[in-house]
Image: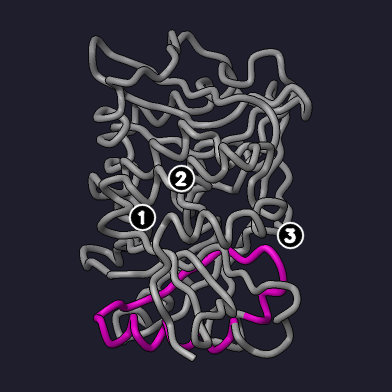
């Protein structure tokens, strides 16, 4: 048995029809395939994204998606790999193939200089615990939209040319955190592509808003209006400074509009204090897990365990 990279077209032909019921959401198979191929062929995909399989000769035993990202622990860069879409064909399950595949990949990543691995577990987190992964707080919140203060902020829909301003807001807000995901231009292009795809949407439609001062973006929210759930589903927010941070509650209320609730992942540690606490509950899916591969990774996990009280990351980092 050996690990081998699967060409995007081969992965689309041999794996995606099988994983379609699990992860396509409300997309058709054709859209699911075309969007996956678009990511693989993008600038980010060509450099930092791979589909990998465990093979016995020519037989594909199991597969996964591999993402390269950087995290930060204070001012230190922490190279990381993300693991997604772990899949074993039903007829081959229960034989340990996925365990062998991931253990081999973790060894390869360690040898290549990666400090940490991360994933979002949808089922059986204990499977990943056995491979050295540790689960971190993964919680959702729900609050009444009318619990958010209203304020004259003149929100506007996010436009194509606003993304550089969004990036500056993200970096300013992220600067208050001891540890988190870093975003280079490639990571931003991947996030923008996935938002445009709507690949994470089970219901509703994308509804992203910004607050400007002149031509400068001062704050933003990314999320989904879901009338089916009577809720605005928050993915992320950011701001340039303390004054702009104070507009976030009103911006969320504007995003909710006539919907009764605001919900989503609990914002990361220092950023969650900007909105009322609402009701928090543990997520049953997308449980965030990390495994330390080298000393810098162990230091990162210690930092997160000591300081993190919300989710480690925004929903926009989900893979």
Q: Which of the numbered marks, if any, corresponds to residue 271?
A: 2
Q: In this view of the protein, can residue 233 be seen by the observer?
A: yes
Answer yes or no: do the residues labelled 2 and 1 have beta carbons within 8 Å? yes
- Residue found 54% across the figure and 70% down from its top: 289
Does 73 sit above or below residue 204? Answer: below
Judged by depth in the image, the label closer to the viewer, 1 or 3, is: 3
Q: Residue 97 location in percent, x, y?
A: 60, 86
Q: Pointer 3: what residue? A: 284
Q: Nearer the viewer, residue 189 or 34?
A: 34
Report the span colored magenta: 98-127
- Residue found 29% across the figure and 32% down from its top: 240
Q: Secondary structure at mark 1?
A: loop
The verdict on residue 109 being magenta is yes
Answer yes or no: do the residues labelled 1 and 3 have beta carbons within 8 Å? no
Q: Pointer 1: what residue? A: 177
Judged by depth in the image, the label closer to the viewer, 3 or 2, is: 3
**Distance between the alpha carbons at the discs numbered 2 and 1:** 8 Å
Q: Residue 220 location in percent, x, y?
A: 41, 27
Q: In this view of the protein, can residue 306 be seen by the observer?
A: no
Q: Nearer the viewer, residue 288 or 45?
A: 45
Does 181 sit above or below residue 150? Answer: below
The verdict on residue 248 being magenta is no
**Distance between the alpha carbons at the discs numbered 3 and 2:** 23 Å
Does 35 sit above or below residue 256? Answer: below
Does 198 sit above or below residue 97? Answer: above
Q: Residue 290 location in percent, x, y?
A: 48, 73
- Residue found 70% across the figure and 13% down from its top: 258
Q: Residue 123 location in percent, x, y?
A: 71, 68
């Amino acid at each position: 048995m050996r690990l081998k990279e699967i060409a995007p077209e081969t992965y689309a032909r041999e794996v995606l029809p099988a994983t379609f019921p699990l992860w396509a959401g409300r997309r058709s198979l054709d859209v699911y395939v075309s969007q996956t191929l678009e990511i693989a062929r993008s600038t980010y995909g060509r450099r930092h994204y791979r589909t990998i399989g465990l093979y016995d000769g020519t037989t594909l035993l199991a597969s996964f998606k591999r993402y390269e990202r950087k995290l930060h622990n204070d001012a230190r860069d922490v190279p990381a790999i993300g693991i997604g879409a772990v899949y074993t064909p039903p007829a081959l399950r229960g034989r340990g193939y996925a365990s062998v595949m991931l253990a081999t990949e973790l060894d390869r990543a360690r040898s290549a200089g990666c400090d940490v691995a991360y994933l979002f577990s949808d089922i059986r987190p204990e499977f990943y615990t056995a491979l050295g992964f540790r689960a971190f707080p993964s919680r959702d919140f729900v609050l009444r939209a009318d619990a958010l203060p209203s304020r004259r902020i003149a929100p506007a829909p996010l436009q194509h040319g606003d993304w550089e301003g969004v990036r500056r807001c993200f970096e300013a807000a992220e600067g208050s955190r001891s540890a988190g995901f870093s975003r280079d231009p490639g990571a931003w292009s991947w996030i923008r592509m996935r938002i445009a795809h709507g690949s994470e949407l089970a219901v509703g439609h994308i509804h992203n808003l910004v607050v400007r001062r002149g031509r400068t973006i001062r704050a933003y929210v990314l999320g989904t209006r879901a009338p089916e759930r009577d809720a605005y589903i928050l993915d992320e927010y950011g701001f340039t400074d303390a004054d702009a941070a104070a507009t976030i509650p009103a911006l969320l209320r504007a995003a909710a509009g006539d919907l009764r609730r605001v919900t989503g992942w609990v914002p990361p540690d220092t950023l969650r204090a900007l909105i009322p606490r609402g009701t928090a509950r543990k997520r049953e899916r997308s449980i965030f897990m990390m495994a330390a591969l080298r000393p810098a990774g162990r230091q990162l996990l210690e930092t997160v365990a000591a300081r993190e009280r919300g989710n480690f990351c925004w929903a926009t980092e989900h893979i």
